[in-house]
Image (cartoon, rainbow, N blue to C red):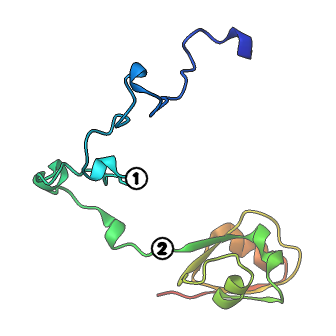
């Protein structure tokens, strides 16, 4: 579809506020009189109902969600290993290379990509294919078990 084939009314113009009373959006510009909603920078947080007990707090919690209890694990692929300086790959060297965040506590090595040199890898976890590829290239893999 070309720009000249767009149906009429498909693209509405921006609501022009404060341009006189004739268009219905003048004076207070659809914000009412005074109050926080009339001020610049005001925004309601999601779920706020004006001080009334919000619906999400009225409803009971049901079921179990593991997100509060799970530990996050940073992921590194084999294709990223050349960015690490040196032969030894561990948590600190991955942080220095910028492959994982500085606050990462655990790292898992995945087998996406190829390995061209022998690495000494010391990570929290590794996939089966990553282990096979590292050992086939003449490297070693030490997996720390908790």
Instruction: Return the x and y of residue 38 as percentages of the image width and height.
Output: 32, 47
Instruction: Return the x and y of residue 136 as percentages of the image width and height.
Output: 82, 76
Residue 104 image-quadrant placement = bottom right
Nearest the viewer among 53 and 37 is 37
User: Vertical placement of 3 versus 65: above or below?
Assistant: above
Evaluate whether residue 42 shows in this view. yes
Residue 40's label in the rendered image is: 1
Answer with left or right where residue 119 lies relative to residue 71.
right
Instruction: Return the x and y of residue 56 as percentages of the image width and height.
Output: 19, 52
What is the C-alpha distance between the residues marked 2 and 1? Answer: 39 Å
Answer with left or right where residue 3 lies relative to residue 30.
right
Answer with left or right where residue 28 lies relative to residue 95.
left
Q: Earlier in the sequence, mark 2 or mark 1?
A: 1
Residue 18 image-quadrant placement = top left
Q: Residue at x 83, y 86 (%)?
A: 85
Element type where label 2 sits in the image: loop
Q: Quadrant of the N terminus?
A: top right
Residue 72's label in the rendered image is: 2
Element type where label 1 sits in the image: loop
Nearest the viewer among 56 and 37 is 37
Residue 3 image-quadrant placement = top right
Q: Residue at x 77, y 77 (%)?
A: 134
User: Vertical placement of 44 versus 142: above or below?
Assistant: above
Nearest the viewer among 101 and 26 is 26
Q: Residues within 10 Å of mark 2 (few under 14, many from 20)?
A: few
Nearest the viewer among 13 and 71 is 13
Q: CB of mark 2 within 8 Å of CB of mark 1? A: no
Q: Residue at x 65, y 12 (%)?
A: 6
Instruction: Return the x and y of residue 31 as percentages of the image width and height.
Output: 32, 39
């Amino acid at each position: 579809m070309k720009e000249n084939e767009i149906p009429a009314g498909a693209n509405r113009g921006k609501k022009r506020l404060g341009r006189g009373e004739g268009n219905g959006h003048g004076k207070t510009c659809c914000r009412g009189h005074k109050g926080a909603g009339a001020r610049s920078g005001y925004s309601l947080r999601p779920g706020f109902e004006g001080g009334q007990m919000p619906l999400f707090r009225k409803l009971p919690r049901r079921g179990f969600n593991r997100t509060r209890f799970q530990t996050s694990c940073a992921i590194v692929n084999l294709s990223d290993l050349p960015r690490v300086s040196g032969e030894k790959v561990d948590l600190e060297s991955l942080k220095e290379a910028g492959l994982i965040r500085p606050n990462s506590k655990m790292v898992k090595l995945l087998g996406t990509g190829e390995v061209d040199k022998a690495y000494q890898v010391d990570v929290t976890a590794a996939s089966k294919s990553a282990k096979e590829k590292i050992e086939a290239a003449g490297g070693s893999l030490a997996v720390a078990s908790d």
